Image (cartoon, helix red, strand yellow):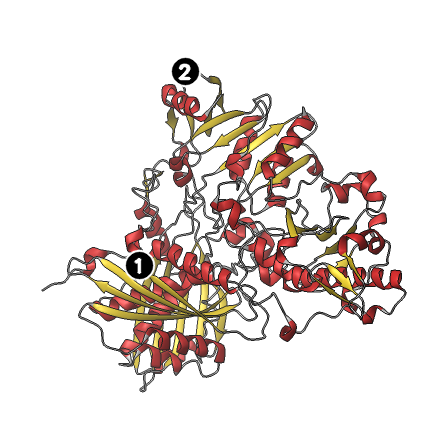
Amino acid sequence: MLQEFEIMDELVLKEQIVDETAMSRRAFLQGTGLLLGFALTGASTESVFAAPASQVVESEVTGTFAPNGFIRINPTGAVTLVIPMIEMGQGVYTSLSMLLAEELEVKLDQIQVQHAPPNHALYVNSIIGIQNTGGSASVRAFWTPLRQAGAVGRNLLIAAAAKRWNVDPATCRAKDGVVFDASGSKHLSYGELATAAAKLPVPSAANVKLKDAKDFTLIGTRARRVDSAIKVDGRALYGIDTRLPGMKVAAVAISPVLGGKAKTVDEKAALAVKGVRQVVNIDEAVAMVADHMGAAKKGLEAAAITWDDGPNGKVNNADIVKQLEEESKKPGAVARNVGDVGKALAASAQRVDAIYQVPFLAHAAMEPMNCTVHLQKDRCDIWVGTQAPTITQSQVAELTGLPTDAIKIHNHLIGGGFGRRLEADGTILAVKIAKHVDGPLKVIWSREEDIQHDMYRPYYLDRLSAGLDAAGKPVAWTHRIAGSSVMARYYPPYFKDGLDPDAIEAAAEPPYALPNIHVDFVRVEPPGVRTSWWRGVGPTHNVFVVESFIDELAHAAKQDPVAYRKGLLGHNPRALAVLSLAAEKAGWGSPLPARHGRGISVQFAYGSYTSQVAEVEVAADGSVKVKRIVCAIDCGMYVNPDTIEAQVQGGTLFGLTAALHGSITFKDGRVEQSNFDSYLPMRIDEVPVVETHLIKNAKAPGGIGEAPTAIVSAAVTNAIFAATGKRVRSLPIDTNSLKSSS
C-alpha cells in the first residue's frame, strides 16, 4: 500500500516538482549523474559543498536526508534544483532557478525544481536562521549560495570535457547546457559529461569565481515564470488537491472560543448521513470523516454541536484595547535611545502627540487550511503546503512519538501563504484526527473555520511624541509600541531583554535624521487570541505609524510633506532617491480637484528602500476611492523585474485591502467575521492603477514581497488628510469620520 501512495504522490506532484524517490540508490552509486550539494549555515554566504556523488549516502539521494541545496544533472541533461524556498505565488521557482541557471550556463527551461525536504541544518534561510519561507528573504538568503552552486557545477562539467579532449579547461566555455572547445568545433552536452564530472573532486566555493554583474545574461532580465503554464491551464496541484487511494475526507468544526471544547455532539444523527463514516471528537474540535466533502459538511450540520466556551468566553475587543491602553502608559524594553529626549522635548518650540492603533488581521488565503495525513505504526506521511517544513515535522514527531525521520513531509505549491502557513496548527489538528482513522485522511477547513480560527496579525497601540525646533525640524522623538510578540512564541531565542526585533522593525531605525530618539516596546498578550506572522508584522504597523506621524510633523511645521522628508534624508541617499523618484513619477505638486489628495510614505524594511505616492478621492459621504499608487523601489541587484512588479502590485493590494477593510474583532470570545462578506477583500472596482519604478544598483538584493504591503496604508491615509484635512490614526479607515460637513 505504501508503494501505491508513493506512486500517487509522484502523480500528484506532476510537473511541479521532481519525485523525491525518482533516482534509485543503485543508479546513483553507479555514477549515472552529477550531484552537487551545498550547506548553508548561519548567515554566512560561503557554501560548503558536499562530497562527490559516490560518497553520498542513500538517504541523501532519496530525499530522506537530502543535503541543504543541490543540483542534479542526469545523463539526459536535465538539471534539478532542490529548491529551499516554497512557491506560494511570489515567484521563487523562477527567481531562484535564474540564480542557478546564470552561473551553471543553462537555459531557464532546462531546470526542474524539487522541494527541499525538512532539514534545518542544510536548508536554513540564513536571514531568519531556520528553514522557512518568509521575511521577504528568498533571494536575499540564496543570492550567493545558488550562484556558487551553479558556478561549481559549470567548472566541473568544463573540467570533465577538457579532460576528455586533453586540453586546458581555461580554453573551454559553456553555454545552454553544452561545453565547447576553443574552436567551437567540439562540443559535449551536460548530460554526456555528467558521469565523468561526478568523479572529479568538488572545488571549494571560495575558489570559484562568480560572474561580474556586467556579464549577466539572465539575472536582471524579464523572464516568464516557470510555473505560469500549469497554473493557467489548471494542471497545477496544491495541497488541497491531494488524492490518494482509499482516502477519506474530513470537515471540521473547531471550538469558536480558544480553549473551549465540544459539550454535546449528536453522533447518531451525523452517522445517519449517507457517506459519513466516522465522528472524531478531540475536545477542541469535532471532525466528520466521510467519503466526500459534501457528506462531511452535512454530517457536521446534523451533529448539532454545542460548545463549552472555557475560560475565554468573555473576551471582547473593547477589553483588549483597554488592556493595551493601560499597559502602553508604562515604560517598555528600550529598543533605541540616542541623545537626551526628555531635555530636547522640554526645550522644543512645538510639541506634537499622537496615539495610533492597528487591528487584528486575518490572512484569508484563497486556499483554506488543509492537510492530508497517513499515520501508520512506524511512519507518518503528510501532504501539505507549508512554509516551515522542519517546524511542522518536529511538532508532528512530538505529537506522534515517532522519530523525526519517520515524518515525511510532501510539500506542495501553496495557494496563498502570507505567513499563515509558517504555523503548523492545521497539520497538528489533522494528525490528531488521523490518529483515530485507518488509512489516509484529508482534513479541509471551511472558509468560516479558516477565518475564525486564524492566527492573527497582532493588534498594536502606539504612543508618539515629538518636539520641533523653530524651523519645524524634529529635535525629539519618542515612540512606544504596545502589542503581542510573535517572536517570543515562535523564535524564543530571538526575544531578548523584552525586545521583539520584528515588532520594532522600521520604528527603532526610521530612515530620518532624528538627533534625540527613544523607542521602546511593551509586550502585551491579549487573552484568548493567537497572533502570528502576516505578510510582514512589525513594519506593517510601524511604517503606518512613523510615516503618518512624520506627515503630522510636516503639517505642524507648515511644510510640504515631500520637502519636509527631503530635509531629513540628506544622510540617507537611497531613501532620498526613492522618495524623489516616486514624487516625480506621481506628479507631486500638480493641481487636483476638490476632495482629491496625494500622500507619500517612505520606508526601509526587509532590506529594501521603498516610497509610495497614493492619489485618492474622498466622496462627500466619506467613501474613499484610491485612484493611483506610484511605487519607487530600490531593492539592490534584482533578479527578475517582472516578479518585482507583480509583487509590488500584489503586496500593495494586500496592504490596501487591510487599510480599507481589514479588521478582526472579538465578542464573547468569538471572532465576529466569518467569510468574505464580513472580512472584505478588495473588489475589482476598488483596485487602483499601480505603477512600479525600479532603481537598480550593485548593492546586495533586498526583499520585495512584504515591502509594498507595509508602506501603502500611510500613503493612503496621508492622501486622505491632504484631501479632507482629517487625520486617520487608526485602521481600517473609518469612512463615517470623513463625511463632508457641507
| Residue 4 placement (x, y as % from top left) | 66, 27
Which residue does the numbered mark 1 point to in the structure image?
Answer: 730
Residue 705's spot in the image, x, y percent?
Answer: 49, 58
Left or right, residue 165 beside residue 401: right
What's the amino acid at mark 1?
Ser
Q: Where does label 2 land, which residue?
A: 273
Q: Residue drawn 59% across and 63% down?
A: 140
Toward the right, the furthest residue is: 166
Residue 135 in percent (x, y) is at 53, 57
Q: Secondary structure at mark 1?
A: loop
Of residues 448 and 359, the one drawn nearer to the viewer in this rendering = 448
The answer to whether residue 516 of the structure is visible from this angle is no
Q: Nearer the viewer, residue 354 or 562?
A: 562
Residue furthest to the left? 742
Above/below status of 628 relative to 367: below
Residue at left 51%, top 54%?
A: 90
In the picture, the quarter occupied by the C terminus is bottom left
Going from N to C along the chain, the mark reached first, 2 or 1, is: 2
On screen, 422 above or below 9? below
